[in-house]
Image (spheres, rainbow, N blue to C red):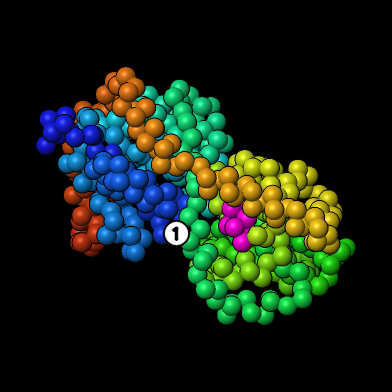
Amino acid sequence: MSSARSGRPPAVHQVLATLGYGDAIGNEVLGITRVLREAGYESEIFVETADPRLEDLTLDYRDLIDASHPDNILIHHFSIGSRASRIAYALPDRMALVYHNITPPEYFVGVHKDLVRFCYSGRRELQAYVDRCDLALGDSEFNRQELARFGFERTGVLPVVPSLTHLEETPDLTLVSEFDDERVNLMFVGRVIPNKRIEDVIRFYHAYRAKYQPRSRLLLVGSWGGFESYLASLHHLIADLRVPDVHLLGHVSNAELTACYDVADLFLSASEHEGFCVPLIEAFSKRVPVVAYAAAAVPATMDGAGVLYESKDPRHVASILHTVLSNPTLEEEIVREQDAALNRLLARDFRGTLLAAIDRVVETPRKPRPRVRDDFWDRFAEWERLEELRLYRPSAYKALPFATGEGSENP
């Protein structure tokens, strides 16, 4: 029964490519669902894939076709182009797009050719939603401004209010017990990918160690899956600089991550492209002073706290690290400012902002129904049959007379 006939509010569903466990987007999606259901909205999460720990909370994105209704609202989380995105585009439901940013593809040239293509096509595909969305929301002011540059007329910010409960676990010191000593521990947390500029972090550490503090080490925490060639380049750099005590710890559990923050003396970031950067806030919450490159969303995320730098001269950054770490009074002042920034972030009215955005969509004059090819749904049905064949009868699928790459083409 439609919401219009029943007198109930419209259903507000979410659609996205992948629901991850413990990441910023996944936590936001789950938070949105809680708020919507508490407010009386019917709300489901439709995905292509989900972490096994979250699968019970989701529905297959193809089921969205049956759940669709012109009175409904889709909250479409756009982070890269996907089949789920294209299905959402073709449906008659109203749409609020939430943009989590797509890293510019040039960062991955020569490192991950598939990601170059995905990021390029994703940023290009985003432009197709300018006339499709009733409202476009960035999860930071930086992302909202990027939406405006893409041409979206009605924009806003649905703030990231990170869940920090994963850092409340009992620390597991197994991984870092040897680092809990009198040495200075510099740390960075984030995926080992080129836009994070981990090579710059290594150079800054090398300069700091050589000039100021030989009794120091660098802890690099984050997964490098799919970026083994970039990881190899970091190992080559470490060898060329002959800098010791650089520890690439890879993906860690929440208990291990908590332990890493507990032994860290300073969080150092050189990242050049961030849509928000949750690890900065994690460091704030663990009262670790932050020194970060002033790029993309980082200054807004830090909200006047921590220390920002604009020159990547290793000697300049090393002098900042020394100034912070050699002055306990200054370090305590930095941490107090970070405490205040964290309190401001956690005090944001996420619930009120979300529900106001839903009201804004409902009250906005409806946009024309999206134009899709006449054969779109026929092609989708054909693709669905091929996908079933690929999953359950792979030998028969491989025997089909496809041109190269044709069999996996999206509708």
User: In the drawing, does residue 146 fall left or right of residue 209?
Assistant: left
Residue drawn at x 39%, y 49% is 31
Residue drawn at x 77%, y 57% is 331
Task: Note whether 175 is above or below 83 in the view shown.
Answer: below
The x and y percentages for residue 1 are: 11, 37
Asked whether residue 403 appears in the rendered view, the answer is no
User: Magenta span has 46?
Assistant: no
What predominant SS class does the magenta segment belong to? Answer: helix
Q: How many marks?
A: 1
User: In the drawing, does residue 310 fall left or right of residue 106?
Assistant: right
The x and y percentages for residue 168 are: 51, 66
What amino acid is labelled 1 in the image? Gly
Task: Note whether 82 is above or below 9 in the view shown.
Answer: below
The x and y percentages for residue 181 are: 73, 78
The x and y percentages for residue 200 are: 72, 54
Point out the image quarter for the C terminus: top left
**In the foreground, 349 or 77:** 349
Residue drawn at x 64%, y 52% is 339
Asked whether residue 284 appears in the rendered view, the answer is yes
- The residue that mark 1 highlights is 22
What are the residue bounds of the magenta stretch?
280-286
